[in-house]
Image (spheres, rainbow, N blue to C red):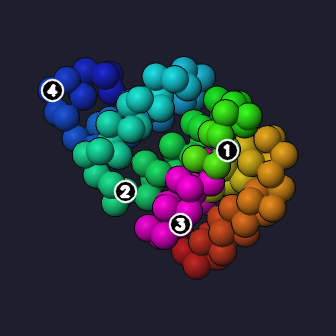
């Protein structure tokens, strides 16, 4: 459905939702490409940056520098004031899974703070 949407309506929102679907289908390579396209169309969407963070961490290639890229994407999503607490909780868990407990703690604290403010 989202794939059809992106062929008829090339928007960042359509590509982001397709990327999210691919992420949860564990098609990380494809999800990364689609989220990159969403990011090109709208660099100011904090959710795109957040989902990109999650994709990079889920790819599980810590040794190839993707964890650093994920950290940079997380920083950008926070700079843009991401307010998706569920996504931030998922990001915190993913950073824990790759052994980066300091960044996990920051992501989880941000999620809790955001949730408390809403």
Q: Pointer 4: what residue?
A: 8
Q: Pointer 2: what residue?
A: 45
Looking at the image, residue 101 lies above or below residue 59 = below
| Quarter of image, res 17 | top left
Say which element carries label 1: helix
- Residue 40 % position (x, y): 29, 45
Label annotation for residue 67: 1
Say which element carries label 4: helix
Q: Does the residue at mark 3 contact the one at mark 1 (Cβ under 8 Å)?
A: no
Looking at the image, residue 6 sits to the left or right of residue 27; the answer is: left
Specify start and end residues of the magenta stretch as a single range.
70-87
Residue shown at 65% from the left, 40% from the top: 65
Is residue 21 visible in the rendered structure shown here?
no
Q: What distance separates the C-alpha of mark 3 from that of mark 1?
A: 16 Å
Residue shown at 67% from the left, 44% from the top: 67
Looking at the image, residue 18 sits to the left or right of residue 51; the answer is: left
Q: Does the magenta stretch include residue 19?
A: no
Residue shown at 74% from the left, 48% from the top: 95
3 or 4: mark nearer the eye? 3
N-term mark: 3 or 4: 4
Say which element carries label 2: loop
Q: Please name whichever residue, 62 or 33, is drawn nearer the observer in this view of the structure.
A: 62
- Residue 1 % position (x, y): 32, 22
Q: Pointer 3: what residue?
A: 78
1 or 4: mark nearer the eye? 1
Q: Is residue 78 magenta?
A: yes
Looking at the image, residue 48 lies above or below residue 3 = below
N-term mark: 1 or 4: 4
Q: What distance separates the C-alpha of mark 2 from that of mark 4?
A: 21 Å
């Amino acid at each position: 459905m989202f794939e059809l949407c992106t062929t008829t309506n090339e928007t960042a929102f359509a590509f982001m939702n397709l990327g999210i679907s691919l992420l949860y289908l564990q098609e990380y390579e494809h999800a990364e490409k689609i989220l990159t396209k969403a990011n090109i169309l709208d660099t100011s969407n904090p959710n795109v940056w957040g989902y990109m963070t999650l994709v990079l961490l889920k790819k599980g290639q810590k040794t190839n520098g993707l964890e650093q890229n994920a950290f940079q994407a997380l920083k950008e999503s926070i700079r843009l004031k991401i307010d998706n607490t569920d996504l931030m909780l998922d990001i915190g868990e993913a950073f824990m899974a790759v052994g980066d407990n300091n960044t996990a703690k920051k992501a989880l604290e941000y999620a809790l703070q955001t949730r408390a403010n809403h």
